């Protein structure tokens, strides 16, 4: 998510001003994998699994590792990358904590007569969380048009994912399994993960001195 054309297009192994490698490919990879796991659950692909495969990685990879990428972007004086990676690192850690500290205790304490109301309230909680991040993502989407086509694609697909899942969770009621709208959001989230993985792969390839390089596209707004 670098705003430096030299770092996203030209092959270089280190950032010339700080002496550290570009952390954007790592942050994008961490975001992509965790998004893929949660989106697979939302798309109802995990009917034969617990559905919680994403949870540990929300703390360790999408959370902690992406947060580290954000801190390294501060070192690189990249305000856009630092803000994006740090925020979504916090998103994953916060979402994991919400499940552990709010969802699981609330469901465990619910009685048959109150279970539906509890699940509805939890779905609304998630709707509000997604709405808040969709607002943040809106101005990051606009600003990503000055980075590259690949990064713009990440924020565009993510924006659609967050909006659809926000609507889906507000309308889910007491549903314990993904509704039709949430499944749609899950499929869009899978596309988001693939786009982020591509942007990560492009960053790695362009950070090497080899001949194999993946294009990221020039900024839409130069």
Image: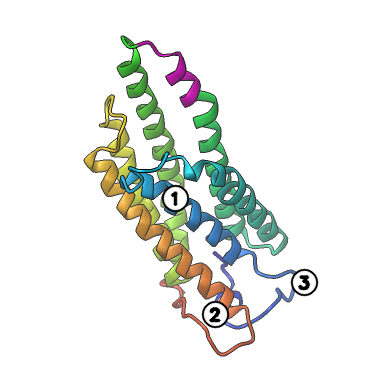
What residue lies at 54% left-to-right and 64% top-to-bottom? 1
Distance from disc 2 to disc 1, alpha carbons, whole Å, reads 29 Å
Residues 179 and 139: in front is 179
Task: Say which mark, if any, is on residue 37.
Answer: 1
x%, y% of residue 66? 60, 53
Q: Work out whether 118 lies above or below 138.
A: above
What residue lies at 37% left-to-right and 52% top-to-bottom? 159
Q: Which residue is mark 3?
A: 19
What residue lies at 70% left-to-right and 64% top-to-bottom? 76
Q: Secondary structure at mark 2?
A: loop
- Number of callouts: 3
What residue lies at 36% left-to-right and 45% top-to-bottom? 46
Residue numbers of the magenta segment: 103-111
Q: Secondary structure at mark 3?
A: loop
Image quadrant in which you'd find residue 90: top right
Answer with left or right where residue 180 lies relative to residue 221.
left
Distance from disc 1 to disc 3, alpha carbons, whole Å, reads 34 Å
x%, y% of residue 116? 30, 18
């Amino acid at each position: 998510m670098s705003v430096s054309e030299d770092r996203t297009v030209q092959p270089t192994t280190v950032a010339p001003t700080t002496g550290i490698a570009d952390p954007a490919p790592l942050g994008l990879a961490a975001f992509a994998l965790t998004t893929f796991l949660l989106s697979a659950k939302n798309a109802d692909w995990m009917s034969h699994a617990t559905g919680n495969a994403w949870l540990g990685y929300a703390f360790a990879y999408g959370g902690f590792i992406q947060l580290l990428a954000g801190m390294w972007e501060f070192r690189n004086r990249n305000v856009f990358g630092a803000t994006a990676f740090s925020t979504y690192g916090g998103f994953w850690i916060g979402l994991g904590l919400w499940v552990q500290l709010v969802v699981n205790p609330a469901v465990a304490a619910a009685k048959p007569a109150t279970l539906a109301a509890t699940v509805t309230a939890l779905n609304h909680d998630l709707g509000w969380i997604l709405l808040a991040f969709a607002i943040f993502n809106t101005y990051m989407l606009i600003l990503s048009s000055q980075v590259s086509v690949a990064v713009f694609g990440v924020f565009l697909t993510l924006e659609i994912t967050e909006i659809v899942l926000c609507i889906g969770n507000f309308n889910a009621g007491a549903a314990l399994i993904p509704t039709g709208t949430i499944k749609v959001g899950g499929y869009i989230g899978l596309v988001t993960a693939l786009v982020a993985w591509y942007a990560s792969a492009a960053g790695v390839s362009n950070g090497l001195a080899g001949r194999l390089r993946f294009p990221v596209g020039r900024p839409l707004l130069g």
